[in-house]
Image (cartoon, rainbow, N blue to C red):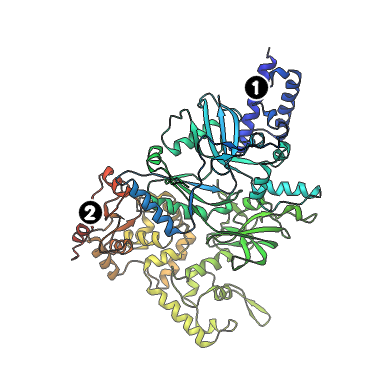
Amino acid sequence: MTTPAERIESLSRQIREADHAYFVEQDSSLTDLEYDRLVSELKKLEASHPDLVRADSPTQRVGEKISKDKTPIEHKRQMLSIENTYSEGELRSWGLKTEKLLAGEKLEWVCELKIDGVAASLLYENRSLVLALTRGDGRFGEDITANVRTIRDVPLRLPPSAPDSLEVRGEIYMTNTDLVRLNMVRTARGEKPFANTRNVTAGSIKQDDPAVCAERRLRFFAHSVGVTDGLGVTNHLDFMHLLNDFGFATSPFIKKCNSFEEAMDWCNETIARLHELDFEIDGIVLKVNDFEQRERLGATSKAPRWVIAYKFEKYEAPTTVREIRVQIGKSGTITPVAELEPVTIAGTVVARASLHNADEIARKDVRAGDQVIIEKAGKIIPHLVRVEKHLRKENVPEFVFPSRCPACDEPLVKDPGGVFIRCVNNECPGRLRERIEFFASKSAMDIDGLGPAMVEQLTSEQQEGLLAMPPLVTSFADLYRLTTDKLMQLERMGRKSAENLLAAIEASKRRPASRLLCALSIRGIGEKAAHTLMSHFHSFDRLAKATREEIALLPDIGDKLASNLWEYFHDEAMLAQLEELRACGLPWELTEDEKSELSQLQERALFGKTCVVTGTLEHHTREEMEDLIRSHGGKASSSVSKKTDYVIAGESAGSKLTKAQQLGVPVLSEAEFMKLLQIEP
């Protein structure tokens, strides 16, 4: 028979596991009812057996009110602030300086989101939480232990695998979803709503009554180590994995990069994904991965030399959603868009914002008529942060994502395992307009005068008296069947304008075959991939006969693009469309001049080779050297790998040179490289 002590231990374990699943893994392992029943049973058992109540019991997260005598407590190790910059140029210079300090050594970087919250330090003794401090002035912090105990993704007790003594540092924050919920509760009570997550977090963590803090559902991301009696890991990424094993939530999107250039690329890619986050960030943190290298880099009086924050300016403003509509892309993707009351943010008038996909609308619960907060961060396009639900009028209907295409009324299909919903009807007029517009764009067939307004007219029904006439263009080939008389049927289209457009359409027949391949809107096949494919296969006929495996072997193509391409060339409707274009005189294969140029390129010293430029060169800038690489048939890359053929190294080459030497990649000086290209210095 189970004893009360055993049952209390079992219930505590189940509740801790449920908290971890919900707050750390974002996965509900129990229903609310099941969770509440476990907590209720545990409370009753502990009330009957007060001698069995432990300090780290899930029921003890909310304790007595905090004493108003808040004497500052000294940190065991000073919590320094970190250096930051808003400039990509300054960031690059900092990275080069750090690499010089460790010249000749392999250097790895870890990139993390910079959470916009409140810094805190958590101290565990005998694997139990005993103290939590704010950063304060770096030397002394304020005791916030009672409030931190209410944060449900902060473990009160660590597993046996954790060291006896451990200090974990991180950021306390609030999600936008929880701010929306809290403001609805406060408004219902007649209290003033909070303006943003950062302010409410800072105010909540210093509350005298932990019950108030508990109501606000704060969260914690662990991001660094303070003091410890031994971890058994030697680098930051392994430490983060260890923290996950101990039950802590760590920042999502964390990434290890083998060069500073790779880290910078990751920063810029990640900032473009801000709309996916339910919490606020104000930058990216870049850290040296290796702990021993950090020790040798040391710190200034203000900040460590091994870490920097790449920050961006954030601006936000309230506005109202006039309506939510969907638009269709050339590949059939249905994208919801919020039409807004125009609002000025950072000097730019914002009147619309993408809602990206159906899942995001559901997560943020966006509805027409809602007051919302729009944010613009750095150079990134504006995105919707949250809905001010406490201001929502009654009975506002939810947005219902269409189940059928708004342009052709065919059923929409969700990507297997994905978030995008598409129209898969190749005859869809909405898709046609987008595809014709892309077909005419500069990166494709470059047809001057065939912009969105003209495409709209060409692909819409025409009116002749009381009769509705079919659109002039229902396929790519129809563009090449247009005549002056047909064009002059269009509104505000005179003879001269019609002749100019026809001349531009005719000129497009002289574009390279790779441009036509790009113009077809095959999913994933852009300018670069089209050039690679046509350079290898030389003609549409050979490309159509290629297997998936043959296509996938080409540089930068891979299995997914190969599959998309193979399916296109095995679709009878697509093949019929291609044959129509062929009959209209469009480029079907490389011209003799193009073949000759390609042949000459293949004979050049760098054809098919990947080169990396590093360090400071004497006679060329890095950009000039990369242009030389490309003009001689090579590919310029920013990172060294086993696939790198040459590294061109100048002064202060740093980690890329070290990695090349470790991998056995040939390293050339600037003079040796110019000799290889047979260029006189």
The residue under the point 31% across, 47% down is 103
Front one among 211 and 590: 211
Q: Amino acid at mark 2?
A: Leu
How many numbered callouts? Answer: 2
**Apparent side of residue 92 relative to residue 663 in the rendered image (left or right):** right
Rendered position, 627 above or below 461: above
Q: Are marks 1 and 2 in contact (CB under 8 Å)?
A: no
Rendered position, 195 above or below 432: above
Counting residues from the N terminus, which is met first, the one under dot 1 or under dot 2?
1
The residue under the point 40% across, 67% down is 515
**Position in image of residue 268 (x %, y %):** 47, 55
Q: Amino acid at mark 1?
A: Ser
**Residue 27 shows in this picture:** no
**Position in image of residue 182 (x %, y %):** 72, 46
**Apparent side of residue 466 relative to residue 121 in the rendered image (left or right):** right
Q: How far separated are the C-alphas under marks 1 and 2?
A: 64 Å
Residue wearing tag 1: 10
**Position in image of residue 285 (x %, y %):** 49, 48
Front one among 524 and 389: 389
Where, by quadrant of the figure, is residue 343 drawn?
bottom right
The crowd level at tag 2 (other Cα within 10 Å; few <14, some 14-19, many 20+) is some
Front one among 1 and 313: 313
Q: Secondary structure at mark 2?
A: strand
Residue wearing tag 2: 668
Q: Residue furthest bottom?
A: 495
